[in-house]
Image: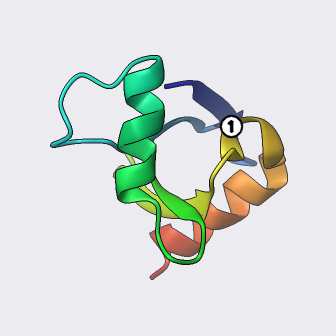
Amino acid sequence: MKQREVQDADNTRWSCVQALSGLGDASGADAEAAADKVEGDDGTVPVACTPSGGAASVRIRLPRGWEEGSSDEELLAAIAAAEHS
């Protein structure tokens, strides 16, 4: 799975990757099959974002294809919402 990095206004760098824990080794075609298994009815997939600093990791749901289809601002907004929920 592809990983995305974004940096927020506090200079925290977040590394985000689609969360496929418990689904075995997911790479290539296997990754697509694993993504199918975790995709929600609304077309979203779980994504885990880990900060570079002392903040806690967050899990968010984003539209499938978020790696290339979501802007940095959209990722940061989802991370911020998860941190405050």
Instruction: State the image quarter where residue 73 is shown.
Output: bottom right
Residue 6 against residue 40 in the figure, above or below: above
Q: Nearer the viewer, residue 82 or 22?
A: 22
For badge 1, the amino acid type reads Glu
Instruction: State the image quarter where residue 21 is shown.
Output: top left
Q: Can residue 6 be seen in the rendering of this structure? A: yes
Residue most extreme to the top:
28
Residue in the image at 84% along x and 47% along y: 71
**Left or right of residue 23: residue 78:** right
Residue most extreme to the bottom:
85
- Residue where numbered disc 1 is placed: 67
Q: Residues within 10 Å of mark 1 (few under 14, many from 20)?
A: many
Q: Residue 52: where, in percent of width, then height?
A: 46, 31
Q: Nearer the viewer, residue 55 or 57?
A: 57
Q: Residue 61: where, in percent of width, then height?
A: 52, 64
Residue 79 against residue 83 in the figure, above or below: above
**Left or right of residue 7: residue 56:** left
Residue in the image at 45% along x and 82% along y: 85
Q: Can residue 53 be seen in the rendering of this structure? A: no
Q: Residue 84: where, in percent of width, then height?
A: 49, 77
Residue in the image at 37% along x and 57% along y: 38
Q: Nearer the viewer, residue 6 or 9?
A: 6
Residue 62 against residue 8 in the figure, above or below: below
Residue in the image at 51% along x and 77% along y: 41
Q: Disc 1 on helix, strand or loop?
A: helix
